[in-house]
Amino acid sequence: MEREQNSEEGSVFFEDIVKKTKTGVTFPKSLRDELFDEDKDYFFRMVVPSEKNKIVLEFLTEEQAKQLSESSKSKKKPTSEKRKSKSPKKAKTSKGPEPNWSKYFVYDFENQQKVKPILESAFHKFAQDPPDLEDAMGRVKYSLISFLTSTKTENAKLYFSVVKFLVDVIEYFNQPYLIEWMFEKLIPNIKSKFLYESSLLELVEVCLKLKKLDEAQLYLFYVLKSIDEYSEAEVYNVMNSFKQLVSKTRDFERSEKIDLLLKEKLLEYGQGVKNIDYKIQIVEFLEDLNYIQMAYNFAKEIQKNLPPESTRVEHVRKLVKRLHSKPIEYQ
């Protein structure tokens, strides 16, 4: 017996003590460095024996994970139905907020209908009094792991939908810790530049709503950094990103530092771009953000440098006149 134990101990590749926190269990960094490649997705089969004295993780291929998740779902159905019949909590939470699927699923993706019931069950776990945070987040993480595909765009749409979902959870059920969790654990995995920026803007907006202005400034910085990474040939994408940014920030109280970031970046691009229509659009963005004096000054600059034969002369003249008549709230 002693020989067997020694043999078993000799076969151990790694051993450490880990702690389960509110957001789950994290692999030690030294183990991650040894076993995992940052650019690859990994799947595991988790087994807990009836004694409940250990957790076993077995490596799986993506195909094996898909097959097992399908069979696992079908096995778990009776259990979940039994649990529902025993607990009155879902009936209690049904009177409150409900998931808004059209808001979350902005872009259709392959496994959307499979993800929906899992997120719905997580929503009701968040809605319980007190909320079952561990169970709720377990379901959210399951949806993020179990329905990934080999297509980065499809995965980005899934991640973005979960971001939109969790933003509602934050607002409905007062769970602001999810903001940082999304920033650290979820958004870095989004490989679509457009959806990456859109997800960060969701964080900017919810932080502004909650008056977490320092956090909003941080996430805004990452949005602007992403915009700066566009090439000169991608001006259309830059302007589209600015349009999204303005729509997410214009209706909220902003700090002086946030205003400074927005003013400097918009003016930088406005003065750098040669297309008159894009310059005019920058003026309108400044106006939407209530930077009236800056918008007026820039519009006057455009008007001064506009060739007399330009078809935009009259449009710019009206723009200057409109801005001149507006009260200046921000200098």
Image (cartoon, helix red, strand yellow):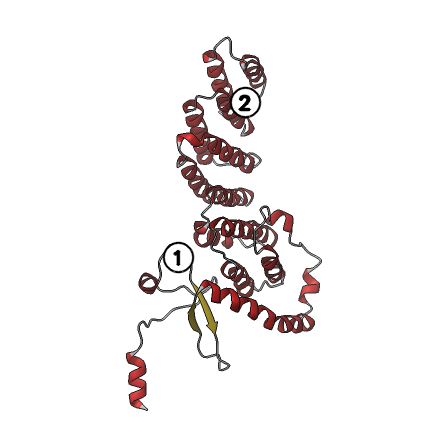
Residue under the point 47% across and 55% down: 150
The residue that mark 1 highlights is 40
Q: How many marks?
A: 2
Residue 225: where, in percent of width, then height?
A: 40, 38
Residue under the point 51% across and 9% down: 309
**Is 109 placed above or below 69 here?**
above
Residue 284: where, in percent of width, then height?
A: 54, 25
Q: Secondary structure at mark 1?
A: loop
Q: Is residue 95 left or right of residue 54?
A: right
Q: Secondary structure at mark 2?
A: loop
Q: Give the residue furthest to the top.
A: 308
Q: In whole angstroms, how far apart are the C-alphas of marks 1 and 2? A: 52 Å
**Which is nearer the eye, 61 or 301?**
61
Residue under the point 30% across and 89% down: 2
Q: Are marks 1 and 2 in contact (CB under 8 Å)?
A: no
Q: Give the residue furthest to the front.
A: 63
Q: Amino acid at mark 1?
A: Lys
Give the class, few, some or many, for how many residues have Cα within 10 Å of label 2's Cα (few <14, many ≥20): some
- Which is nearer the N-term, disc 1 or disc 2? 1
**Is 165 placed above or below 79 here?**
above
Q: Amino acid at mark 2?
A: Ile
**Is 131 placed above or below 229 here?**
below
Residue 249: where, in percent of width, then height?
A: 53, 36
Residue 194: where, in percent of width, then height?
A: 49, 41
The residue that mark 2 highlights is 328
Frontmost of labels 1 and 2 is 1
Q: Can you tell which quarter of the image residue 329 is in?
A: top right
**Which is nearer the eye, 306 or 17?**
306
Give the class, few, some or many, for how many residues have Cα within 10 Å of label 1's Cα (few <14, many ≥20): few
Residue under the point 44% across and 54% down: 185
**Is 70 placed above or below 223 here?**
below
